[in-house]
Amino acid sequence: MPSAIMIKYASTRFMIKDNFLYSDITAVIIIKANYNVYNTLGFGFLERVYENAIMIELNKLGLSGEKQKQIDVYYDNEKVGLYFADIVIENKIIVELKATEIISVEHEIQLVNYFKATDLEVGLLLNFGRQPEYKRKVLLNELKKKTNKA
């Protein structure tokens, strides 16, 4: 049974479900690429180094992705800013890379904001800290519509 957690950010609550949407890509290929890169480079580099290495590894494993994909952010139907997602894989999965001690709640909120600004529903946080770490999150589009009305 999938689990869900509630995150309260500002005055809005978000339900993030861990489920198995695109698990064939996330669990098998992207996480494998993550560990291949970590086992080769270790920790201590800047995120950009890991981003370039992950792209090489994903290509070797048969996936295509776009680095630093621009995501426009709208408020009341007006563009108010933009984000750059580290990697978007096959227009299905957002990959956010970190090179910190641990994945924090702020990193998870960053991924939630990417979900809110796109129709993408699946994301991975990959951390290249002292120990490799990842978190897979899903925010279904039908839940986004409900939370935006709250």
Image (cartoon, rainbow, N blue to C red):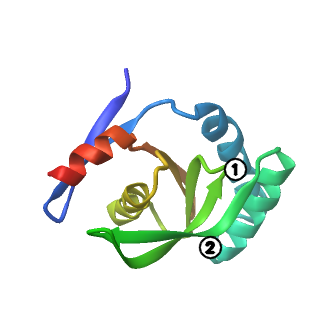
Q: Position of residue 33 (x, y in %)?
A: 73, 49
Q: Position of residue 45 (x, y in %)?
A: 67, 75
> Quick check: can you spot residue 15?
no
Between 41 and 94, the one lying in front of the other is 94
Between 100 and 25, the one lying in front of the other is 25
The CA distance from mark 2 to mark 1 is 15 Å
Circle 2 is placed at which residue position? 47
Residue drawn at x 82%, y 53% as measured from the top left: 59
Q: Amino acid at mark 2?
A: Glu
Q: Residue furthest front?
A: 77
Residue drawn at x 37%, y 62% as measured from the top left: 113
Q: Amino acid at mark 1?
A: Tyr
> Badge 2: how crowded within 10 Å, few (<14), some, or many (20+)?
some
Circle count: 2
The reply to whether callout 2 and callout 1 are in contact (CB within 8 Å) is: no
Circle 1 is placed at which residue position? 35
Between 2 and 64, the one lying in front of the other is 64
Secondary element type, mark 2: helix
